[in-house]
Image (cartoon, rainbow, N blue to C red):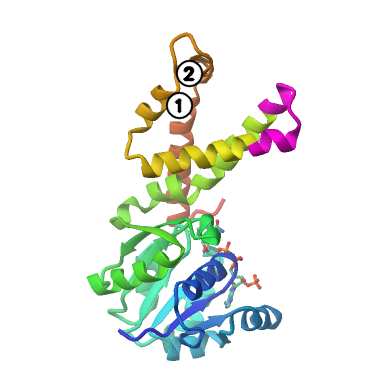
Amino acid sequence: MSQKVAVLGTGKIGEALLSGMIRAGWAPADLLVTARRPERADELRTRYGVSPVTNIEAAKTADTLILTVKPQDMGTLLDELAPHVPADRLVISGAAGIPTSFFEERLAAGTPVVRVMTNTPALVDEAMSVISAGSHATEQHLAHAEGIFGAVGKTLRVPETQQDACTALSGSGPAYFFYLVEAMTDAGILLGLPRDKAHDLIVQSAIGAAVMLRDSGEHPVKLRENVTSPAGTTINAIRELENHGVRAALIAALEAARDRSRELASGKKD
Ligand SMILES: NC(=O)c1ccc[n+]([C@@H]2O[C@H](COP(=O)([O-])OP(=O)(O)OC[C@H]3O[C@@H](n4cnc5c(N)ncnc54)[C@H](OP(=O)(O)O)[C@@H]3O)[C@@H](O)[C@H]2O)c1
């Protein structure tokens, strides 16, 4: 498979992907970008040395098209692209909630489509990207998508039926951690610490805990038990978390996110 890749609708996620690919060794000459506004196209050319093209030029030239417009803009983009995308091109959708069937119905019969749900840590090369094959995507197409999204973090293949659950876990996941840090920082202020110090303490604790979770190979229960001594401080905090139903709240919250992802995938917008 040739390596000419176009990012169509290069906004926040598209740019994160583009910059990650360049850092990972892709040649800017092999990368095309499209943007709706000329000033955005100029910005991308200046910043990355890539060639801005029209959506139709991208469709005709690139071997792989990565569509990173907002879900509500995807129909319009596909209407423009569909007549120009040869059926042997790989189309990768980075849009939340849109099933591969949406693309397959609009593109030439047999066009391989791969759906990817990434998350905002793509901006710092720590994304979690969940990858599913459409009906015509092969092992080679999946591997190609992994090669691209692997430039900005980890990848995981799942059946498309699990995409809504993954959206709830990793797509929205960073927001839950930001929310926790915000709440814990408020707690630090209540306990008399200045906001900036409370923030630093919580963020570094979060980073340390995340690295331990990733690298120690230990179950989270074991890691927590290791810092929960008899009659100590941590168990007092854990008792309050249980009293306030935090575990149940998290389960309900992720279930609600999964349900909303399903609604969006079925076209319900409000
Ligand atoms: N941000 C996230 O947390 C996140 C996480 C995972 C997945 N995603 C998915 O990633 C996709 C992009 O999200 P984002 O946050 O990166 O959005 P974004 O910053 O708004 O990027 C989308 C870009 O597409 C451009 N665009 C729209 N229609 C176009 C067209 N017909 N031709 C060319 N360019 C067009 C927009 O131009 P303008 O600047 O003129 O509007 C914008 O720059 C979404 O589908 C979203 O579901 C986002």
Residue 129, picture quadrant: bottom left
> Is 261 drawn above or below residue 82 in the view shown?
above
State the residue position of label 1.
247
Residue 232 in the image: state x and y as whole percent.
Answer: 50, 12
Name the amino acid type tagged 1: Arg
Part of the protein shown in magenta: 187-200
CB under 8 Å between discs 2 and 1 = yes
Residue 67 in the image: state x and y as whole percent.
Answer: 48, 73
User: Taking the image as drawn, is residue 214 in sight?
Assistant: yes
Query: As rendered, which of 231 and 257 lies closer to the eye?
Result: 231
Assign ligand 1 to one image quadrant: bottom right
Q: Main secondary structure of the magenta part?
A: helix
Query: Magenta stretch containing residue 195, yes or no?
Result: yes
For the N terminus, give its image quadrant.
bottom left
The residue at 52%/73% (across/down) is 18
Describe residue 213's horizontal placement relative to residue 238 as left or right.
left
Residue 9, picture quadrant: bottom right
Estimate how packed mark 2 is, as few (under 14), some (14 to 19) or many (20 or more) residues with alpha carbons within 10 Å: few
Residue 210 in the image: state x and y as whole percent.
Answer: 46, 41
